[in-house]
Image: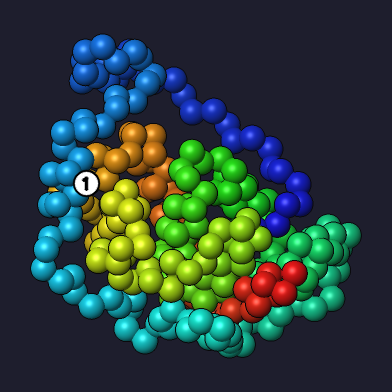
Amino acid sequence: MLEIAPPSPHTALPPTSTSDADEIERDRPPGVPPHQDPEPDPDRVEEASEESFPASDPPAWEPLHAGEPGPPKEGEASHASAPLLAPVEEPKTLFQRLAFWVSRRQYGKVLTPLKVVYARKPRLVFLAQHIAHTMEHGLSLDPELNALVSVYVARLNGCAFCQDLHLAQAIQKKIGVERFAQLEQFATSPLFTIKERAALAFVDEAARNRRVSPATFAAARAHFSETEIVELVWLNAAQHYFNLQSSVLGFGSDELVEAARAR
């Protein structure tokens, strides 16, 4: 969200045991060097894609929970509402004042999570910054696909604030936002590539069911490396982390899209 100060690096994971490593190498296809993902089998791309997207019309799109807001219409401020906890308008510490200043400089206003969550628990801003920085700069996924997935998951979870934030960031990065209005029709819309459809179907099913079917996984695996599959799973989980905070505490849109367009 905000570029303030990177947190200390996470403690490294313990090395994989010898037995685990041996098992991984036994499963690795011939000719693939260690620590390198095997390339998807091109012969399976079309077959897996067809299995994931049947010719029949998909069910009507709906958010994960009844009563949650759907996508905002073009040019409409999305679902403004008052948070359950009163925003802290006057920061008490030097660090909080710095965070508020950075937010105003980057977005033209102090973001609602800063005033509601991080003003009350400043330590959490370092965790949020680390996750947000990894989402934006630490993944190998295409930036436009990253934005599509982020907005789609936020929309599934009914997080108006997160939708607005990611759309504004897409505008700042000169990513065309026309396709975001068609996200609910990704399975049939010609605006999305087969690879994008596979990724969106993957995160949609993961968000709704907490698992994916073999056909959905095969369609994603046909287009993405093992590392990219892990990144899709992590990106979905990271979005849920932010979405749940915003939704539970009742954050509405900060109307960042209009501000980004005006710049």
Toward the viewer: 193 or 115? 193
Mark 1 lies on a secondary structure that is helix
> Where residue 17 sits in the image (x, y, percent)?
35, 17
Q: What's under tag 1, amino acid-wise?
A: Ala
Q: Quadrant of residue 200?
A: bottom left
Is 96 on the left-hand or right-hand side of 76?
A: right
* Residue under the image location 16 percent in, 37 percent down: 44
Q: Name the colour scheme.
A: rainbow
| Residue at 12 percent of width and 60 percent of height | 54
Query: Could you tell me how many numbered marks the image carries?
Result: 1
Is 9 rendered above or below residue 258?
above
The answer to whether residue 256 is visible is no
List x then y, in percent, for residue 48: 16, 45
Q: Quadrant of the image for the C terminus?
A: bottom right
Residue 128 in the image: state x and y as whole percent.
Answer: 62, 55
The residue identified by callout 1 is: 219
Q: Depth check: 196 or 129 in front?
A: 196
Neighbourhood count class around disc 1 (C-alpha, 10 Å): few under 14, some 14–19, many 20 upward:
many
Q: Is residue 53 left or right of residue 234?
A: left
Does residue 112 appear left or right of residue 203 in this picture? right
Residue visible at 17% across and 54% down in the picture: 52
Check the image and name the residue furthest to the front: 190
- Residue 221 visible in the picture: yes
Camera-side residue of 118 and 105: 105
Q: Residue at x 88, y 60 (%)?
A: 94
Percent of width and height locating residue 98: 85, 59
Specify the quadrant that holds the N terminus. Answer: bottom right
